[in-house]
């Protein structure tokens, strides 16, 4: 797809049926505002056990299908059993099913178009959908086309692929497949416009690297472009470590390492006695300076480790169309630091508009207050889904309807 350029790749809806806590009736999560525009800053707010993590895991799993034409190929690429390509029990077996809808503004062969792409997974027969996109529904989001793709099971648990009879789908999947492994380039400055979803679980610890491993200068696991990434606690393997990623950026010597250190030190360690100073050669690892003493990355406190993980990996892997998912961003952070993180994420979404969508799952009232749903802010389309009581919803009214202009190009 040499003549295919994506201007905007943003989420619209997620429909969930019989997965996790959503067993009694289907649940729909709208990622749009009152004008039908995709939000670029979205909050899922609820107590534990209400389904916030399930929503993020489903979002990441469904986006991970892109680039594969068979569920068996997805399973092989992720080192999973062929009958469990998603590694989510209710999606891999039983009656569970889900549908994730995206709005894609693109240019093909010199013509601007807008399409809705629906991704399906789970027990679903060929022509069925959890959410239908007729002409009127498409018009509300400014789209002219509806395309469907997914890996579905029948009642006999046999997998099949939906959508390969659609030429647009085969071209799109082929384009993603061909782009996978391409150089992303830049740190938060990629020129690649293929979409990617980056998911951070609530567990973002940095652990010591296995001392028995040789620390060669090698690319990190899943280096370069992929349609989805999932990050959690490190395994202790060298190629999986944040040390390896930063050593690799330093070795590339193209400016990304210096920019990464500048941004991370500003966002994480401003007004403190701590800073990332560089990398040492023997052994290969990152040097953190605190009060004049040099330490390893894994010596940082839990809140600092969580933030460094997020900002470094996001900057290294994001493209011009990125969806960032963070589960419990407030983990291990004091309330004032939670507020500062929320403001920093807002700023990133504004600066990258409309190319960065941020979706947070939290039970922090401090972060919800800083989110300020009712306040209009430049280059922010804000939205939220509140799984708690009516009283909580009344405290965070939706903003007045307003019109956002779409850039013709970026």
Image (cartoon, rainbow, N blue to C red):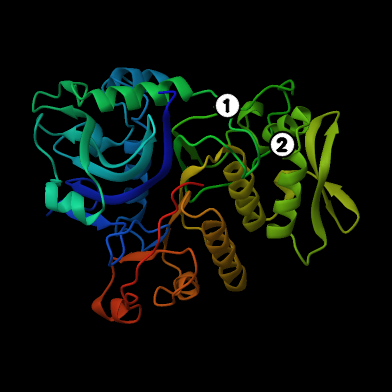
Label 1 to label 2: alpha-carbon separation = 13 Å
Which sits in the foreground, 189 or 267? 189
Residue closest to the far right = 292
Quadrant into which the N terminus falls: top left
Q: Residue at x 67, y 34 (%)?
A: 245
Secondary structure beneath label 1? loop
Quarter of the figure with residue 347? bottom right
Residue closest to the far front = 110
In the image, taking residue 257 as reference, residue 320 lies left or right, namely left
In the image, taking residue 35 as reference, residue 189 lies left or right, namely right
In the image, taking residue 143 as reference, residue 197 lies left or right, namely right
Q: Compared with residue 165, is residue 264 higher up or lower down, i.e. above or below?
A: below
Question: First in sequence: mark 1 or mark 2?
Answer: 1
Quarter of the figure with residue 196? top left
Residue 387 placement (x, y as % from top left): 28, 66
Alpha-carbon neighbours of circle 2 within 10 Å: few (<14), some, or many (≥20)? many
Q: Residue at x 28, y 19 (%)?
A: 70
Whether residue 32 is visible, yes or no, is yes
Q: Compared with residue 139, is residue 35 higher up or lower down, i.e. above or below?
A: below
Which sits in the foreground, 45 or 126? 126
Q: Residue at x 44, y 77 (%)?
A: 375
Secondary structure beneath label 2? helix
Q: Which residue is drawn at 36% across and 65% down?
A: 383
Residue receiving disc 1: 221
Residue receiving disc 2: 246
Residue 34 placement (x, y as % from top left): 28, 67
Quarter of the figure with residue 118? top left
Residue 54 placement (x, y as % from top left): 32, 49
Residue 86 placement (x, y as % from top left): 32, 31
């Amino acid at each position: 797809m040499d003549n295919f350029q994506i201007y905007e790749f943003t989420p619209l809806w997620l429909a969930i049926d019989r997965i996790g806590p959503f067993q009694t009736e289907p649940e729909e999560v709208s990622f749009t505002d009152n004008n039908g525009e995709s939000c670029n800053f979205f909050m899922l707010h609820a107590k534990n056990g209400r389904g916030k993590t399930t929503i993020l895991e489903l979002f990441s799993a469904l986006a991970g299908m892109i680039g594969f034409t068979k569920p068996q190929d997805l399973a092989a690429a992720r080192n999973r059993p062929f009958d469990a390509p998603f590694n989510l029990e209710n999606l891999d077996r039983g009656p569970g099913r889900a549908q994730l809808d995206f709005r894609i503004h693109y240019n093909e062969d010199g013509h601007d178009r807008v399409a809705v792409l629906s991704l399906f997974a789970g027990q679903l027969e060929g022509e069925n959908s959890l959410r239908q996109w007729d002409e009127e529904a498409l018009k509300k989001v400014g789209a002219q086309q509806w395309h469907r793709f997914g890996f579905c099971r029948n009642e006999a648990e046999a997998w099949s692929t939906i959508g390969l009879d659609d030429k647009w789908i085969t071209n799109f999947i082929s384009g993603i497949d061909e782009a996978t492994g391409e150089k992303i380039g830049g740190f938060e400055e990629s020129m690649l416009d293929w979409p990617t979803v980056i998911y951070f679980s609530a567990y973002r610890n940095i652990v010591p690297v296995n001392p028995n491993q040789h620390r060669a200068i090698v690319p990190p696991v899943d280096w370069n472009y992929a349609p989805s990434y999932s990050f959690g606690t490190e395994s202790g393997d060298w190629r999986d470590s944040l040390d390896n990623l930063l050593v690799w950026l330093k070795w590339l010597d193209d400016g990304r390492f210096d920019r990464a250190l500048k941004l991370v030190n500003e966002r994480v360690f401003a007004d403190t006695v701590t800073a990332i100073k560089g990398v040492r050669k023997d052994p290969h690892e990152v040097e953190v300076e605190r009060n004049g003493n040099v330490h390893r990355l894994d010596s940082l406190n839990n809140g600092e480790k969580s933030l460094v993980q997020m900002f470094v990996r996001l900057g290294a892997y994001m493209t011009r169309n990125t969806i960032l998912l963070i589960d419990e961003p407030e983990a291990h952070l004091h309330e004032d630091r939670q507020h500062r993180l929320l403001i920093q994420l807002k700023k990133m979404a504004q600066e990258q508009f409309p190319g960065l969508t941020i979706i947070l799952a939290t039970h922090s009232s401090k972060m919800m207050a800083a989110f300020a749903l009712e306040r209009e802010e430049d280059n922010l389309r804000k939205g939220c889904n509140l799984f708690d009581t009516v009283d909580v919803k009344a405290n965070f009214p939706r903003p007045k309807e307003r019109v956002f202009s779409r850039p013709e190009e970026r």
